[in-house]
Image (cartoon, grey):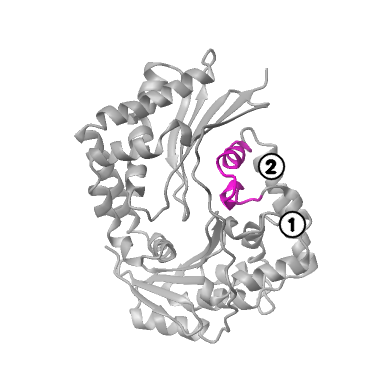
Amino acid sequence: MIPYIRQTLANGLVVVVNRDRASKLAAVNILYRVGARNENPARTGFAHLFEHLMFRGTRQVPNFDLPVQMASGDNNAFTNNDYTDFYITLPKDNLETALWLESDRMEGLDITPEKLETEKRVVIEEFRQRYLNQPYGDQMMLLRDLAYRTHPYRWATIGRTPDHIEQATLADVEAFYRRHYHPSNAVLSISADLDEERMLALAEKWFGPLADRPSAADPVPQELPQREARRREVERDVPATTVSVAYHMGRRRDPDFQTADLISDLLAGGDSGRLYNRLVKERQLLSSVNAYVTGDLDPGLFVFTGQLLPGTTPEAVEAAFRQEIDSLLRDAATEYEIEKVKNKFEATTLFGELNVMNKAMNLGFYELLGDLAFINREVDCYQAVTPDDIRSFCSRVLRPENSSTLIYRARK
């Protein structure tokens, strides 16, 4: 259970605070409601580019990292398809340093042509090293592009092509900053052993004076239901062929998300998962296997993926995945299997609540979902999943006509 107080400042910034009496550290988390889903198809990768630019200094603070280090703190960030997250941990007595720095770069980021060119080169090199020149690097990019025809989830956070970043102008980047990095498009969450009213007052002190720059959000084009199976084959210089099958599923806040997540754990929850035991150990079709859900704000994907052993054909793996789905349809799962996965989620949740940074991050994320109170109810939703829920999800979602299959062949 995470106690919290939520408040919205006059400029639209949502502030959520939690008093953690067990920690000597303070965690400050700023979540911006901007990710790859908010990008122009002809200008992708900008949210990720800004993850880099936001550390390049402001007019007031040329070196963002230095004051954090002087305050005995640590900071980092990440970007995904739905949002961008910046976080700082530091001793609680230095909390104001983090609030000062985050409020400063929310309004005063110093984007110069030199800084932009430097970070563009960094991002382009990252694109090449992680996605273009890395074995299996473009596999998920190809799968996304196959599964989605309309929605921005069809490209990865890094973008569709490095050309979009290379061609980005200073005007493009400044416009993106003004549009997305402002109080009413952000959530500030704090966890520390400080009085909640004190934390709210400090948030007001540092963020209250900031002017908002609201702009109407462009509608995100939604994907139409998939009516027939899709398939694509590519060849790459990789050690082994892989098969990935993606099924369209619902949103992170849809009622059956917990069912989907539980099924993925039943299938691929480590060495005790069904896929590992049956397809790796018993049938020796694969050297590795996984099943997971993307957990996106908009309808996401349920993905099966496996790396083939020599002598195994992609058709055999596709059939094996189908057999595991049919098995869940027939028999759902044993009470023991279901209970084990439920207990694992509850334990992971409770363990995560011991960490001050996890609490600050999760408070921001559940606010993003639109139901902050759900942070303290989700365990109950997992515990409520029944065998009938599992069968229902499999029959509605894991259907052949709802599948996109990528055969990623090792070049001979």
- Which amino acid type is marked by label 1? Lys
Q: Which residue is mark 2?
A: 129
Q: From the image, which quarter does the C terminus lie in?
A: top right
Locate residue 41, reporting x and y percent.
67, 54
Q: Of 216 and 178, which appears nearest the observer?
A: 216
The reply to whether discs 1 and 2 touch (Cβ–Cβ < 8 Å) is no
State which quadrant residue 40 falls in: bottom right
| Left or right for 1, reference 257 | left
The residue at the point 24 percent across, 39 percent down is 388
The residue at the point 72 percent across, 59 percent down is 119
| Left or right for 78, reference 21 | right
Q: Secondary structure at mark 2?
A: helix
Q: Against 180, is 237 above or below?
A: above
Q: Which residue is mark 1?
A: 120
Locate residue 1, reporting x and y percent.
26, 62
Residue 349: in magenta span: no
Q: How far apart are the two marked residues, 1 and 2, measured between alpha carbons?
A: 14 Å
Dot 2: within a 10 Å radius of its alpha carbon, few (fewer than 14), some, or many (20 or more) residues? few
Residue 147: in magenta span: yes
Q: Which mark is residue 81?
A: none
Locate residue 102, reporting x and y percent.
55, 73
| Left or right for 42, reference 218 | right
Residue located farthest toward the top when viewing the structure as drawn: 311
Q: Against 199, is 309 above or below?
A: above
Provide the residue span drawn in magenta: 138-159
- Which amino acid type is marked by label 2? Gln
Q: Against 328, is 175 above or below?
A: below
| Left or right for 23, reference 13 | left
The residue at the point 57 percent across, 68 percent down is 217
Q: Of 136 and 52, which appears nearest the observer?
A: 136
Say which label, 1 or 2, has the lower sequence index.
1
Locate residue 375, reporting x and y percent.
33, 61
